[in-house]
Structure formats: C-alpha cells, structure tokens
Amino acid sequence: MRGWFTLAGILAAIAAVPAFAQAGGESRIPTWKQSYLVEGTFDSRVLRAIGFCAVDGRRPIVEKLLATRAYSDQEAEAFDELFKPPLHECLAGDWSFRVNVGPVIRGVVAEYLYKKRGWRPRADALAPPPDFESWAAANVALPAFASPKIRDLVFGSWVARCIVARNPRKAHQLVNFESGSPGETRSLAALRPDFLACVPEGKSLQVSRRTIRYAIAEALYHASQAEADRVGQRTAALEAAE
C-alpha cells in the first residue's frame, strides 16, 4: 500500500493555518507565502498523479463526480466508483484519505479535465455567484453537524467562483503553474485585489494555499463547461437554421 504515507503531508498542507497580512482591511485574506522548498514535494506529485490517472483512465466518472453537490451521497458514490479497483497502476494503493480531502481531490481532477478539454471561460459571459448562503444551498449538501473547518472550505469554494467570474484570465494563469511554485505565488499576489473584492467585510478566508488553488481549478472547470454548452447551443441553432 502506497497511499498511507502521503496522508500526513497532504492533510498537514490542507489544515495548515494560513498566514494573514496585517495591513488594514487586507487582514481577512491570507498571504499564502511559503518557502520555495515546498515546490515539488511528494504529496504534490501524488496529487498530480491522481489528477492525471483519474482523467486519463476514468473520465466519465470524473465528470459524474464534478456534477454532484459537495458532501452529498451522490458525491460519495462517485468517489467510491472513481477509486474502486482495479485502478490504473499509478492509483494503486490505499486512498481512503480521499474522504478527508474531498474538496482538494475534486479540484485536482477538475484542473486536469479543464486543461485537457481546452475550453476557457470568457469574462464577458460570466456572472458572479449569488450570495454565499444561496450558493451553498444550491451546490453543497452540508450536514448540520459540519465542523467549522468544513464550513471554511465551503466558503473558500464560493470565493473561488467569485474570483473566476471577476478575473478568469488570471485564474487560468494560476493553475498553469505547478502547485507550490514561485509562479503560483506571483499569481496569487496578482489576484489579491479580486480576493479583497470577493471576501465580504467582516469575513476572513481561512483556507490553505493548496485548497484555494484547487477550488479555483474546479471553478474554472465549471465556467468552461458553461462556455462549451453555450457554444454547442449556438452551433445547434445555426445548423437548424440552415
């Protein structure tokens, strides 16, 4: 079994308390600064392998997973189907930790599928998400006993949707850099005005750097899916008119 020794590193990275800027209103946004030594860590490579293997070998299941509401029974069923043996060789091992890092796994596979499909969302076709409570009610099956940590993750997903709607170009640039890389650091800094615009006054974003990266990746995937659907509808309408 290969998966067990990745658990500590991945969960530590996800659960790490982000450093916050101390200047004025920016204190509600983490700085997400880190040492360059974090780049290319083993758990980052494991996550990349999961994304590549899942999309390459089980794409229909990945699409099914990303169509579910987070924390729903349907999501749990899709996770079970995705990781059910026999798996692609590079996914072999004990991946039971997926239940604990569901939002990150969703984002990892979403990022690889987004890049493979090639559709990029257009800024003029995107609308910001509704208020957090309305968005969460429609997109998340949040249990009543959900921990504060899970609620922070859900809030981070909502912020990611707002970021992509405001600045899809810079969000796209972010996911083009490796996780933990200096380029990712620069991209997060470039998105800081958008983070400040998306996080309401009185709220703070309590998620790790890796979590927000993959939340943005999933938001990009859904925005690109909507763009592909619009193009398909326009094409069908033109063909019907001929």
Image (cartoon, rainbow, N blue to C red):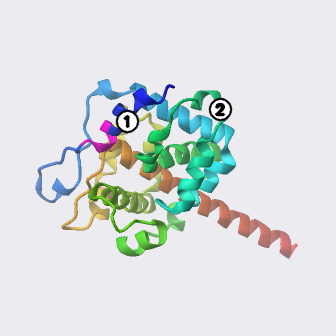
Q: What element does badge 1 sit on?
A: helix
In the image, residue 40 above or below residue 233: above
Q: Residues within 10 Å of mark 1 (few under 14, many from 20)?
A: many
CA–CA distance in space, label 2 to label 1: 21 Å
Residue 167 left/right relative to 52: left
Measured as percent of width and height from the top left, residue 34 is found at 26, 33
- The residue nearer to you, when weighing 5 against 221, is 5
Residue 242 left/right relative to 190: right
| Residue type at the position of mark 1 | Ile
Residue sitting at the far right? 242
Reply yes or no: does residue 45 show up in magenta: no
Which residue occupies 61% across, 45% down? Answer: 82
Mark sitting on residue 88: 2
Which residue occupies 23% across, 45% down? Answer: 18
Q: Main secondary structure of the magenta part?
A: helix
Mark sitting on residue 240: none
Measured as percent of width and height from the top left, residue 9 is found at 35, 32
Which residue occupies 55% across, 44% down? Answer: 109
Mark sitting on residue 10: 1
| Residue type at the position of mark 2 | His
Measured as percent of width and height from the top left, residue 169 is found at 47, 51
Between discs 2 and 1, the one toward the N terminus:
1
Measured as percent of width and height from the top left, residue 175 is found at 46, 42
Q: Quadrant of residue 132?
A: bottom left
**Which stretch did the figure color magenta?**
12-16
- Tell me, yes or no, if residue 235 can be seen here: yes
- The residue nearer to you, when weighing 240 against 96, is 96
In the image, residue 47 above or below residue 131: above
Q: Quadrant of residue 11?
A: top left
Q: Residues within 10 Å of mark 2 (few under 14, many from 20)?
A: some
| Proximity of marks 2 and 1: CB atoms separated by less than 8 Å | no
Q: What element does badge 2 sit on?
A: loop
